[in-house]
Image (tube, rainbow, N blue to C red):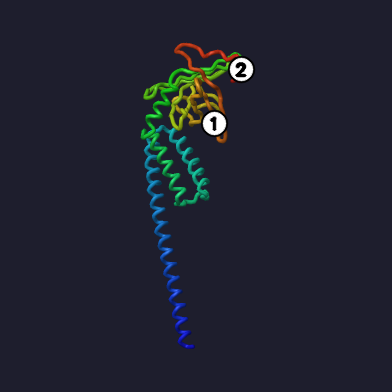
């Protein structure tokens, strides 16, 4: 009986030792995987920071401000998609992948793989565009989009028979849209900054068939403002008698 008890005790001791060893190996493997995941995240995060700084350095003050606000919105969206609490740093597959995608996007803006497509898209909207309606107070819009690579700034005007505004804009083609940052020739309450200062990229134009749709954005919503027709140099936009874009 005593021998059996001793053998049982030895067997139990061996089982406990095997369990402890397995647990230790499991913890070591988990730590190694976590360390590898952390390294991958750090690599992509460093790449994103580098291209962000390079892109920001190529912009003016208003452009850098717009980029900072865009980056904050992206971080909030990434954390929400990955289930990360605001302000926390989590280095997992989800955050690493999203960070990698963001770095790819900014690299394309710097003239990488997406430069050809961006050039072709911007060239498609270059030229003069306009909208004209005599309904009620009338509505008259003109937009001149400079050719790709030109040092020329864009020109815009927008108004009615009784009042209106005009100025210049800078543009950047990304994600199939031409984003615009406006300045105004004269100061207006609640209007754009006076040139040569430029506002945020709170509008964009995008081809829609033969027309160019002008969208405006605020903090929460994006809505179509007006559809523009291509205009021959020195000519006028076709008169809209349907009053679809009446002010």
Residue plotted at (45% across, 50% down):
93
Q: Which mark is residue 177?
A: none
In the displayed structure, 7 sits above or below 41; it is below
Residue plotted at (49% across, 51% down):
88
Q: Position of residue 119 (x, y in %)?
A: 39, 27
* Most distant residue in the top direction: 235
- Quickly name the residue at label 1: 217
SS under mark 1: strand
Q: Residues within 10 Å of mark 1 (few under 14, many from 20)?
A: some
Q: Quadrant of the C terminus?
A: top right
- Quickly name the residue at label 2: 243
Count of numbered badges drawn on the protein: 2
Residue plotted at (56% across, 13% down):
239
Distance (Cα) linking label 1 and label 2: 23 Å
* Most distant residue in the bottom direction: 2
Q: Position of residue 128 (x, y in %)?
A: 46, 17
The disc, 1 or 2, on the residue closer to the chain's N-terminal end is: 1
**Image position of 157 (left or right of 104):** right
Residue plotted at (51% across, 44% down):
76
Asked whether 5 or 106 is in front, the reply is: 5
Q: Are marks 1 and 2 in contact (CB under 8 Å)?
A: no
Asked whether 11 or 169 is in front, the reply is: 11
């Amino acid at each position: 009986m005593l021998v059996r008890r001793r053998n049982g005790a030895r067997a139990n001791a061996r089982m406990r030792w095997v369990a402890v060893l397995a647990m230790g190996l499991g913890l070591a493997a988990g730590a190694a995987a976590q360390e590898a995941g952390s390294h991958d995240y750090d690599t992509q995060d460093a790449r994103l920071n580098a291209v962000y700084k390079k892109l920001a350095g190529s912009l003016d003050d208003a452009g850098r401000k717009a980029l900072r606000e865009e980056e904050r919105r992206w971080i909030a969206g990434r954390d929400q998609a990955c289930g990360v609490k605001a302000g926390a740093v989590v280095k997992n597959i989800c955050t690493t992948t999203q960070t990698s995608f963001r770095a790819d996007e900014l690299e394309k803006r710097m003239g990488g793989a997406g430069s050809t497509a961006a050039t072709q898209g911007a060239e498609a909207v270059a030229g003069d565009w306009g909208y004209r309606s005599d309904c009620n107070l009338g509505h008259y819009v003109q937009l001149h989009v400079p050719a790709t690579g030109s040092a020329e700034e864009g020109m815009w005007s927008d108004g009615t028979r009784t009042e209106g505004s005009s100025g210049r804009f800078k543009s950047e083609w990304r994600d199939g849209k031409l984003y615009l940052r406006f300045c105004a020739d004269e100061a207006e309450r609640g209007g754009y900054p006076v040139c040569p200062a430029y506002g945020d990229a709170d509008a964009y134009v995008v081809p829609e068939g033969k027309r160019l749709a002008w969208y405006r954005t605020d903090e929460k919503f994006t809505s179509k403002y007006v559809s523009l027709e291509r205009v021959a140099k020195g000519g006028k936009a076709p008169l809209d008698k349907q009053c679809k874009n009446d002010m």
